[in-house]
Amino acid sequence: MSAYETMPFHLETERLILRPWAESDAADFCTLLAERGKGTPTVEHIRTAIAELLTATESTGIALLPIQRRDQGDFIGYCGLIIGRSSLEEPEIAYELLQRAHGRGYATEAAGEVLGAAAATGRKRLWATVGAWNTPSFRVLDKLGFERDHVSTEDSGEVVWLTRSLP
């Protein structure tokens, strides 16, 4: 059993709702992943991925959550905590938004709420890993108080590791 509290899986901000995955998110999740420019996964593949995310959440007590806009009710991306390149004790914050939702502060708003949820689990530190090319993501993390720690090189290029202590 984990030494940490389970993260809250329903988070709300002024403009956004973060909630658990539903099978009905599959088509929107496909669209988001297709925007990465590496092809479009099948809806079946995405349904499997959603099932795996939900299973991981059950075993870890942390979650990557879909983001929907409160007013429109539409899916615009995801934000949450993952083990990723890090550990369950010091997970990574992760977020990705549809291009049509970029530049409106949604990532910062959602990630700020996730920071609070992470602190509520009793964790002391979070990581973020970002491709060196991803300037908008660095702006979000800077606003949230993350600081650069080190750089690693992967097949996809340089990855910058940032960290932030939790209150």
Image (cartoon, grey):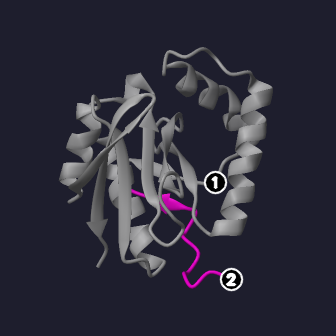
* Nearer to the camera, 24 or 167: 167
Q: Mark on residue 20?
A: 1
| Quadrant position of the N terminus in the picture | bottom right
- Sequence-wise, which precedes: disc 1 or disc 2? 2
82, above or below 50, in the image: below
Query: Neighbour class for label 1 at 10 Å: few (<14), some, many (≥20)?
Result: some
Q: Is residue 126 left or right of residue 2?
A: left
* Nearer to the camera, 116 or 151: 151
Q: Main secondary structure of the magenta part?
A: loop
Q: Which residue is mark 2?
A: 1
**What residue lies at 46% left-to-right and 45% top-to-bottom?**
70
- 7 magenta-colored: yes
Residue 158 found in image quarter:
top left
Find residue 142 and report its horizontal and vertical position in percent.
19, 50
Find residue 11 and report its horizontal and vertical position in percent.
49, 61
Q: Amino acid at mark 1?
A: Pro
Q: Amino acid at mark 2?
A: Met
Boundaries of the magenta span:
1-14
**What residue lies at 50% left-to-right and 43% top-to-bottom?**
78
Residue 50 found in image quarter:
top right
Q: Is residue 112 left or right of residue 73?
A: left
Using the rendered image of the protein, determine whether residue 24 is visible from the camera's viewpoint: yes
Element type at mark 1: loop
**What residue lies at 49% left-to-right and 54% top-to-bottom?**
80
| Quadrant position of the C terminus in the picture | bottom left
